[in-house]
Amino acid sequence: MVIEGSFFMLSIDVELLWGLRSELESNIRQIYPYISFIPKSQHLLAYLLTLLNKYQIPATWAVVGGSITNPCQDSDQYLTRYFDSLEFFNPCLHKEFLPLWQTFDIVDKVLESPLSHEIAAHSYTHPDFWKISMDTAEIEIRASKRIFKETLGVDVNTFIFPKNHINYLGILRKYSFKSYRGKNKGSISFKKLTNILYFVNPSKLSVSPRLNNGLWEIPGSLLFQSTRKYDLYRIYITAFRNIKHVIEHGGIFHLMIHDYSLVPEEVKMLFTKLIRMLGKLNDKEKLVAITMKELVKVLEKGNNYVADKNI
């Protein structure tokens, strides 16, 4: 569906240690370098919220449901079985790991924010929906819906699939979700042939929502994340030029990050620079910053929301 106006959307996958579920269950040695990122990501999430509030950029915070409960006090047998399988990283046996699983502080601050951020469901325990059964998928979706309502009083409407592996849309609809994040429109090619030309003509990654199985699919545009400085600057330039393209031609640019994305100082610096620019554009009404939930409201009203595109 073509939507009138120029929109910027940011979705944040808040996972902590849940995001390493498959590695924890298979090859723990592979994730040791990333464990040190988790405590830092808690701090960076607080920085990110302060930054977004300052520049009036609301975001969709996709939170793993299990992270807003205490697994060692919960009577949920589904969680108990999951943690029992982790052995060394079981937070109920080794309490020093518990903060690596929980996001109470940041979620509370998001809800207390004067800005209209959105809390979305990022499943219950972050499994790969391409590899689980329909019964397990229903437990994950139902439990994520329940936990946010019971713990936070929030009726979540948006679902973000772990790894963006989309499956079981009928179950989302059954539990009254209205939208989900679709596949990325494109990804940056790192082939040597395109390295130089890419800076001159980066991909156009504006996205269009569509109805799929009674749900609004809102694709992602670009993941703002890289461990290599050269690729990171290409990502920044891509984001910058796509924002300019959306302002000039209309559409939606949907940027995605993870909780640990801003841990590297170069990523934090460039992302901060981008948000400052977006704040100025938002103030001048050249671009509207919007959450996935609010975009669905626009779509359901028949696209009567039109942003000012004067440059």
Image (cartoon, grey):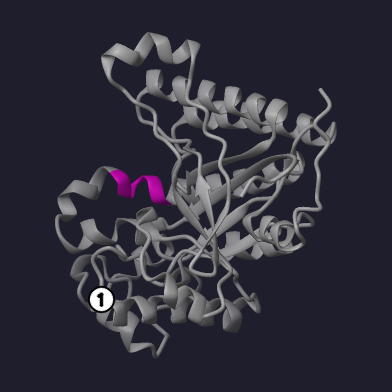
- In the picture of the structure, the residue carrying the numbered disc 1 is 133
The quarter holding residue 100 reads bottom left
Is residue 277 among what the camera can see? no
Residue at image coords 52%, 82%? 146
Is residue 82 among what the camera can see? yes
Stretch of the chain drawn in magenta: 34-38
* Tag 1 secondary structure: loop
Residue 279 point in image, percent of width and height: 75, 34
Residue 308 point in image, percent of width and height: 83, 36
Q: Nearer the viewer, residue 91 or 5?
A: 5
Apparent side of residue 8 relative to residue 55 in the rendered image (left or right): left
Q: Is residue 264 above or below residue 24?
A: above
Residue at image coords 58%, 51%? 209
Apparent side of residue 14 relative to residue 52 in the rendered image (left or right): left
Residue 2 on the magenta segment: no
Residue 118 point in image, percent of width and height: 65, 60
Q: Main secondary structure of the magenta part?
A: helix
Tell how many labels. Answer: 1
Apparent side of residue 308 relative to residue 189 in the rendered image (left or right): right
Quarter occupied by the C terminus:
top right
Q: Is residue 231 above or below residue 47?
A: above
Residue 248 point in image, percent of width and height: 71, 25
Categorize mark 1 by other alpha carbons within 10 Å: few (<14), some (14-19), many (20+). Answer: few
